Image: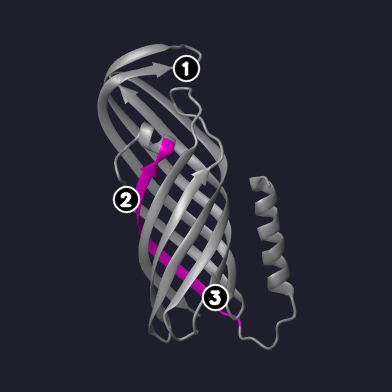
């Protein structure tokens, strides 16, 4: 199943859930804000290998059943590494270049999501979820006076698991892990790249 099909199915599920007759359940909106630490994996680790401590995320989740929410997820994760090595360039002007390199990646995930929660409403609630949509990737490679850029949209998914700890009637603490994976991509060096990284996130949930 392609990412487009997954995204469309999630969107249809969200629309159906929002407009279905569910009068026996009081629906609520959950706003989630998280600080995010991201560990690069695979091709991303090859491009910029440092752990990112610069990330934020926001979720807007709408309850459609007692244990199910659908919504939207937004994020911003910043990766950076300075290294000295020889790199092969495969752009329209191919070749090799050696020296101190600055490598930047700004990842902006924009996804629809669905989550399922275990446990009782007022207790500690583990949950699992799936985010599907895409990533807007801003990439920059600098060495000396040379600067190469590659900005693009890549479809992807982000499976997620976490725990919600209630604090008071109107808010809670949330901790989760999210595996971000883009199905395609291109680096500023002209090489194929499929970005992936593991997000470790902690934040707050506001209920209204």
Q: Is residue 31 magenta?
A: yes
Task: Kindly identify which residue carries mark 3.
Answer: 29
Magenta span main SS = strand
Choose the circle earlier in sequence order: 2 or 1. 2
The secondary element bearing badge 2 is classed as strand
| Residue 64 at x, y percent in the picture | 63, 76
Disc 2 and disc 3 in contact, CB within 8 angstroms: no
Task: Please tell me in which quadrant of the rendered image residue 80 appears.
Answer: top left
Q: Earlier in the sequence, mark 2 or mark 3?
A: 3
In percent of the image, x 35 and y 64: which residue is there? 202
Q: Which residue is mark 2?
A: 54
Reply above or below: 111 against 104: below
Q: Which residue is mark 1?
A: 90
Give the x, y percent position of residue 129: 54, 63
Label 2 to label 3, Cα distance in Å?
27 Å
Extent of the magenta region: 27-42
Residue at position x 49%, y 56% in the image: 74
In the shown orientation, is residue 48 left or right of residue 90?
left
Instruction: Pinpoint residue 151: horizontal percent, then vertical percent.
Output: 49, 34
Few, some or many residues within 10 Å of mark 2 (<14, 14–19, 20+): some
């Amino acid at each position: 199943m392609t990412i487009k099909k997954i995204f469309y199915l999630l969107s249809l599920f969200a629309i159906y859930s929002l407009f279905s007759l569910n009068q026996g359940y009081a629906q609520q909106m959950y706003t989630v804000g998280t600080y995010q630490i991201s560990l690069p994996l695979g091709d991303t680790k090859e491009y910029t290998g440092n752990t990112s401590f610069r990330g934020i995320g926001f979720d807007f989740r709408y309850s459609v059943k007692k244990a199910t929410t659908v919504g939207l997820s937004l994020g911003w994760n910043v990766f950076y590494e300075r290294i000295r090595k020889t790199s092969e360039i495969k752009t329209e002007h191919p070749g090799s270049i050696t020296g101190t390199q600055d490598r930047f990646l700004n990842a902006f995930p924009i996804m629809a999501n669905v989550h399922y929660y275990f446990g009782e409403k007022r207790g500690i609630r583990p949950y699992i979820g799936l985010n599907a949509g895409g990533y807007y990737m801003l990439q920059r490679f600098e060495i000396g006076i040379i600067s190469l850029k590659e900005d693009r949209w890549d479809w992807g998914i982000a499976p997620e698991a976490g725990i919600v700890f209630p604090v008071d009637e109107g808010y809670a603490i949330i901790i989760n892990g999210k595996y971000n994976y883009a199905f395609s991509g291109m680096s500023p060096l002209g090489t194929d790249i499929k970005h992936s990284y593991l997000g470790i996130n902690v934040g707050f949930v506001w209920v209204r």
